[in-house]
Image: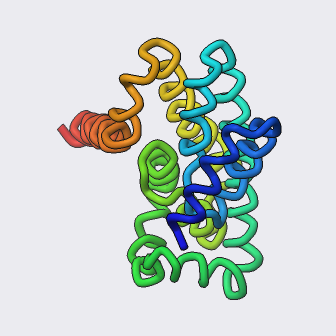
Amino acid sequence: MLRRLYDWTVSLAASKNALWALAVVSFIESSVFPIPPDVLMIPMILAAPKRAWLIALITTVASVLGALLGYAIGAFLFDSVGQPVLAFYGKEAYFDDFATRFETYGAWVVLFAGLTPFPFKVITILSGLTGLSIPVFIVSSIIARAARFFIVAALLKRFGPPIRDFIERRLGLMFALFLIALIGGFYLVKFL
């Protein structure tokens, strides 16, 4: 089933309504959809490199708006919608530990999830459930999603098809390592 959903998502990149499809996929990916918008964004940018910034902007805006839907699901519809989504991703067991850490590191958690392959929808839902400050949530989401999508757009615009494999396979890991180093640096400065 997941493979058919992936193939269907990729086929949208070639349609005449690709930008609208990208916006919809980016929106719902931040709250419930399992396929990341990169699946649409990458072939769209490769096909039209001059539109890379527009494509990244649409992806970012729609993703942040979708993140607000995920937040609302966590805040108001957790039992009926949020719990099944977390169960689908196998993350419901992590909630108690997550809620405790979220009080201290909420903005960092949103940044980490927004930049890496970690399912962003899990964090958006849990952000609403734990009551993370909405301004902190929005700013963290904008920074993370804009960084992720504009870096991908810049790499594709500059290097074209040869960078595609790196982006699809390794960019999430690189973002995760960068964020770990950044947080580690702040931690060292604070406690040394």
In-image side of 65 versus 8 (left or right) = right
Quarter holding the N terminus is bottom right
In-image side of 191 versus 76 (left or right) = left
The residue located at (75%, 43%) in the rendering is 23
The residue located at (49%, 63%) in the rendering is 103
Q: Nearer the viewer, residue 75 or 172?
A: 172
Q: Is residue 186 visible?
A: no
Q: Which percent across, then down, holds residue 77? A: 74, 79
Q: Is residue 155 visible?
A: yes
Which picture quadrant has residue 184? top left
Q: Which percent across, then down, holds residue 166? A: 33, 33
Name the residue at the left extreme. 192
Q: Nearer the viewer, residue 57 or 73?
A: 57
The residue located at (57%, 56%) in the rendering is 7
Which picture quadrant has residue 43? top right
**In this view, 155 is above or below 99:** above
